[in-house]
Amino acid sequence: MAPLLELKDVHTYYGAVHALRGVSLTVDEGEIVTLIGSNGAGKTTTLRTISGLERARSGSIKLKGKSIQAAEPHEIVRLGIGHSPEGRRVFARMSVRENLEMGAFLRKSGPDVQKDFKKVFELFPRLKERENQAAGTMSGGEQQMLAIGRALMAQPKVLLLDEPSMGLAPILVEQIFDIIREINSRGTAVLLVEQNAMMALGLAKRGYILQIGEVTLEDSCSKLAKNPKVREAYLGV
Amino acid sequence: MVTSSATTGTAQRLAAGLRLPIGIVAFLALSLAVLGIDQFVNALTLGAIYALVALGYTMVYGIIELINFAHGDVFMVGSFIALFISSSLLGNDGSITDLPLLAGSVLILFALTIGIMALVGALIERLAYRPLRRAPKLAPLITAIGVSFILQNIIQFFFGPTIVSVPQLVPIEWSIQVAGARVPLLNLFVIATSVLLMFALQLFISRTRTGRAMRTTSMDRDASSLMGVDINRTIMITFLIGSGLAGAAGVVHGLYYGNTTFSLGFQSGLKAFTAAVLGGIGNTAGAALGGFLIAFVEVGASAFGYGRWGGAIVFSLLVIFLVFRPTGLLGSHTGDRA
Ligand SMILES: Nc1ncnc2c1ncn2[C@@H]1O[C@H](COP(=O)(O)OP(=O)(O)O)[C@@H](O)[C@H]1O
Ligand SMILES: [Mg+2]
C-alpha cells in the first residue's frame, strides 16, 4: 500500500537559495514521524512545500499515492493535510472561537463541526475558557494550542506541526506533546518538525535528520536517540 | 480582585468604544454650527462620494498591500459608463420627473454600472496584478500607475479630453425644508445611497463566509490559505467589490455634478486615497470616516473663502495628522477592521 504522505527527491528554491536539496520522506497512516534539524536546515520549507505554500521545483509529493504537487494550498487542505505553521500564525484580532471556525472553513457548519468544537475543547480546556477572547491577547502556549486546534477543525488525515514547542516553558511543552500523542491515538498521522530533538524522539516512532536541505539520516527514534552523532549534534550530550 | 480588574477592563473598553462615536457626533455638531445647514449637507454629499471610492483603495491595500493607483480611474471610468448608459442606452438628456420612471432608470443605471465596473476591476486584477503576485512590491505599483494611464487614454479616445456633461436624472429643484433651509433631495439621495452601500459592505465582510475569508486573508495570507481559503478567488472578489463601489460612486458623481472628465480619477481619486490613509489604510470603517472628514475640511475651506487652497489644506492636515498618528484614525491597533 502507498504511504499516506510521500516526498521523493524534493527540491525547493527561494530565488537562488537552494533550500531543499532532494528531501525524501514518508508518513504512514496513524504514525508520528519527526523531522529534526538545526535552525535553517529546511524543516519549515519542507512543510511549506507539502502544503503548497512553496513550490517544489522538482521531485514528487504524493498523498495516498496521488500527486498533490500542482495543487493550490486550499486544495491541499481539502485533500486532508492540516498544518499548524511555525510561529502559530493565529488570527490575532479574531476570537478563539472565530479562529476555530476558520479552521472548519471548508466544512459545512452543522452537528459534525459542533462535535469537533467539543473535541478540540476537550483536548484544550484552556481554549474553552478563552473562547471569546481575542487570540492575540493569549499567551504563547495558548496560541500554540489554538493553532493546533484550528488545524484539527479541518479533520486532517495528516497533521503537520512546525515547532510546537518553540518559546514555551518546559511544563507546557510536556502538555503539548501529551496532546499530540492523544491526537495521534485518535487516528491522525503527525509529521512533527522540531529543534527540541529530545522531546520529539521520545514521542515519534520514526525520525529523519535534516541538514542543509538534505536528509542525512533516517531511522526509528529509539535508534536515533542512541546514535552518537545525533546525541552530539542535537541532544547536547 | 479578579472581578474588579475585569470590571475596569470592561469600563475601559467601553470608554474606548465610545470615544469614536462621541467624537463623530461632536465633530458633526461643530461642523453644522460653523458651516450652516447648506454647506453641511454639501460636505456630507461630497464625503459620501469620497468614502465610496476610498473603500476600494483600502480594501485592496488591506488584502494585497498594493496602493492601487488605478482605482481612482476605475471610479472615473464608472462615471463615463454611467454617462453612456444614461444617455445612449436609456436616451436621457435631462431630469426625469415621473417618479416610477426615474426610480427605474436610476436602478438600471446603478445595477449596470456597478456590474460592469466590478467586472472591469476583476479583469484588471487578473491581467495586471495576479501575474505579479510573487514579484517585489514595486512591480505591481508601477503596473498600477500604468493601468491608470491606460484607463485615462481609453476614455480620452472615446469621449475626448474635455469636461462632458452627464444627465442629472434626479431633478435638482426637488427639495425639502429643514430648519428653514432648502435641502435638495438629490443630496439626500446621494448620502443615503452611499451609506446604504457602506452598511451592506460591512454586513458582507462581517457576516458572510467570503467576508471572513477576506478578513483573514488581509491579516495573514498564508495562514488563511492553510484554512482552505482560495486566495486568488478572495483577492478577485475584493477587487470586484471595490470596483463595484467605485462604479456606484461614478454614477453618483454624475448625477450630483452633472459632468465628468477623464482626469476625475486623478483629482478626486487622490483625495479618496488620502481619505483611506487618514482613516487607517486597510480599515473599511476608517476609509468611510476619512472620506467624510476630508470633505468637511474641503467644504469648510471654501466656505471661508479658501476654496483654491482646499487641496493644499487637505494634504497639510493629512501630513500633520500622520505625524502624530501614523496608523491613521482607526489604524492597526484599535477595534475591528476588514
Ligand atoms: N522566504 C525566504 N527567502 C529566502 N530564503 C529563505 C526563506 N525562508 C527560508 N529561507 C532559507 O531557506 C533555508 C531553510 O529555511 P527554513 O526552512 O526556515 O529552516 P528551518 O525551518 O529548518 O529553520 C535557510 O537557509 C533559510 O535562510
Ligand atoms: Mg523553521
Image: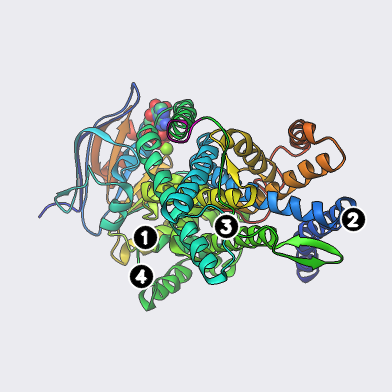
Residue A146: x %, y % from top left: 49, 58
Amino acid on which the number 1 mark rests in the picture: Arg
- Mark closer to the observer (4, 2): 2
**Element at badge 3?**
loop
Disc number for residue A181: 1
Amino acid on which the number 2 mark rests in the picture: Ala
| Residue A189 lies in quadrant | bottom left
Amino acid on which the number 3 mark rests in the picture: Leu
Pick the front one: A91 or B304: B304
Which is more N-terminal, label 4 or label 1? 4
Which range of residues does the magenta coloring cover?
A: B156-160
Quickly name the residue at label 2.
Answer: B33
- Which chain letter matches label 1? A
- Which chain letter matches label 3? B
Quickly name the residue at label 3.
Answer: B169
Q: Name the main secondary structure of what is drawn in magenta.
A: helix
Tell me what residue is drawn at x 44 percent, y 31 percent.
B147
If the image is split into quadrants, where does the C terminus of chain A sit? top left
